Image (spheres, rainbow, N blue to C red):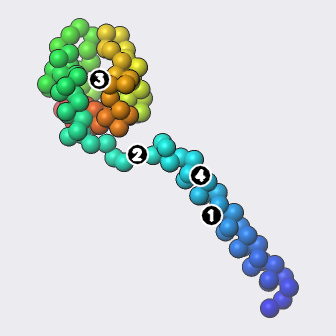
Amino acid sequence: MTRNQMGYERNDRHMKNWFLLFALTLGVALAPYVSWAADPANGRQGYDRYCVSCHGADGRGLVANAPDFSRGEGLMSPDLAIAQTLRSGKGGMPSFLGILSNTELLDVVAYLRTLQR
């Protein structure tokens, strides 16, 4: 094997090691933001407990200015944005910060999406 071929092999291993280190670092950095798929069945429990009195069992809304989830109103944003709205509150809707965990909020969002017809 020539010296040049050895240099390429060494560089290839070096690049693979750096890539592996980068991938592991990225994985560790993003781990807190990665979650398992949301559970709409669990979300229904939260919805029935906290949301149904204003939004109705079918999601059509019982109070003024409540979105009609059966028509997809208020559901055009990404799940995390909707969960943030639930967390902080909006208009007449109270904040659920400290009442529902982040996982439970995402479960409720998953359930809201099942109400669309």
Q: Is residue 59 visible?
A: no
- The residue drawn where x is 23% and y is 30% is 46
The type of residue carrying mark 1 is Leu
| SS at badge 4 | helix
**Which numbered disc, 3 or 4, marks the residue that appears first in the sequence?**
4
Identify the image quadrant of the C terminus: top left
Residue 93 sits above or below residue 48 on the image: above
The residue beneath circle 2 is 35
Q: Secondary structure at mark 2?
A: loop
Where is the N terminus found, in terms of image quarters? bottom right
Can you say whether 12 is above or below 88 in the image? below
Disc 2 from disc 4: Cα separation: 15 Å
What residue is shown at x 55% (from left), y 53% (from top)? 27
Q: Please indicate, yes or no, whether residue 114 appears anywhere in the rendered image.
A: yes
Residue 109 drawn above or below residue 56: below
Residue 38: percent from the left, percent from the top?
31, 42
Q: Are marks 3 and 1 in contact (CB under 8 Å)?
A: no
Per the image, the residue denoted by label 3 is 73
Residue that badge 4 annotates: 26
Residue 10 vs residue 47: left or right?
right
Q: Is residue 112 left or right of residue 14?
A: left
* Residue 19 drawn at (x, y percent): 65, 62
Could you tell me which secondary element the residue under label 3 belongs to? Answer: loop
